[in-house]
């Protein structure tokens, strides 16, 4: 399995959780939405952690500079974390419109981010590093 396959599968899993969460909030069931949001956010943070603690440092050590996409990926992770915080506030206030407006922004950022990772970053990692070793280290987190 490649890093691209492993991480793309995780992207799809996060996407499914996100879609379920949006549907639950849209239905107005905030009791159900709060634990789903917590699960989604934890899954996203774990995904970010695999990249930030394993993949990006390993890639940065071997890439030798040049066009390194990890800086952009890290900025986008921070942007998404900010949106998570806004969504959390909306959930606490049980403000469906605020939540769904922010989640629309998150969806746009996630789609753009995932596309860059799946089409560029992960392929660069697979070409530069031992995919099996990287995946094992990420699984160990």
Image (cartoon, grey):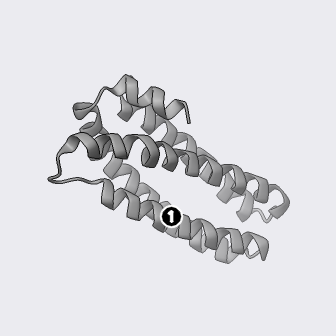
Q: How many C-alpha atoms fall within 10 Å of the one at disc 1: few (<14), some, or many (≥20)?
A: many
Is any atom of residue 119 visible in this view?
Answer: no
Residue 85: x %, y % from top left: 62, 70
Residue occupying image coordinates x 61% and y 53%: 18
* Residue to which mark 1 is pinned: 80
Name the residue furthest front: 61
Residue 140 vs 20, above or below: the answer is above
Q: Quadrant of the N terminus?
A: top left
At a point 50% along the width and 69% down the height, the residue shown is 105
- The foreground one among 11 and 70 is 70
- As displayed, is residue 98 above or below residue 10? below
Tell me the residue at 36%/46% (across/down). 56
Assign the C terminus to one quadrant of the image: top right
Q: Nearer the viewer, residue 51 or 40?
A: 51
Image check: 124 left or right of 23?
Answer: left
Residue 105 visible to an observer of this rendering: yes
Q: Residue at x 39, y 25 (%)?
A: 133
Percent from the top left, x then y, of residue 87?
Answer: 65, 69
- Residue nearest the viewer, comparing 130 with 109: 130
Secondary structure of the residue carrying numbered label 1: helix
Expressed as whole percent of the image width and height from the top left, the position of residue 5 reads: 40, 31
Judge left or right: residue 52 versus residue 116: right
């Amino acid at each position: 399995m490649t890093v691209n396959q492993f991480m793309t599968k995780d992207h799809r899993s996060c996407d499914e959780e996100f879609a379920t969460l949006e549907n639950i909030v849209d239905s107005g069931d905030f009791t159900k939405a709060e634990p789903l949001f917590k699960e989604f956010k934890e899954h996203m943070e774990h995904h970010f952690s695999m990249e930030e603690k394993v993949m990006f440092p390993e890639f940065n050590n071997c890439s030798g500079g040049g066009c390194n996409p990890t800086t952009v990926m890290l900025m986008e992770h921070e942007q998404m974390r900010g949106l998570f915080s806004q969504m959390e506030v909306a959930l606490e206030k049980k403000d469906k419109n605020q939540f769904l407006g922010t989640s629309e922004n998150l969806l746009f950022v996630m789609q753009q981010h995932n596309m860059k990772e799946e089409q560029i970053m992960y392929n660069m990692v697979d070409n530069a590093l031992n995919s099996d070793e990287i995946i094992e280290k990420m699984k160990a987190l």
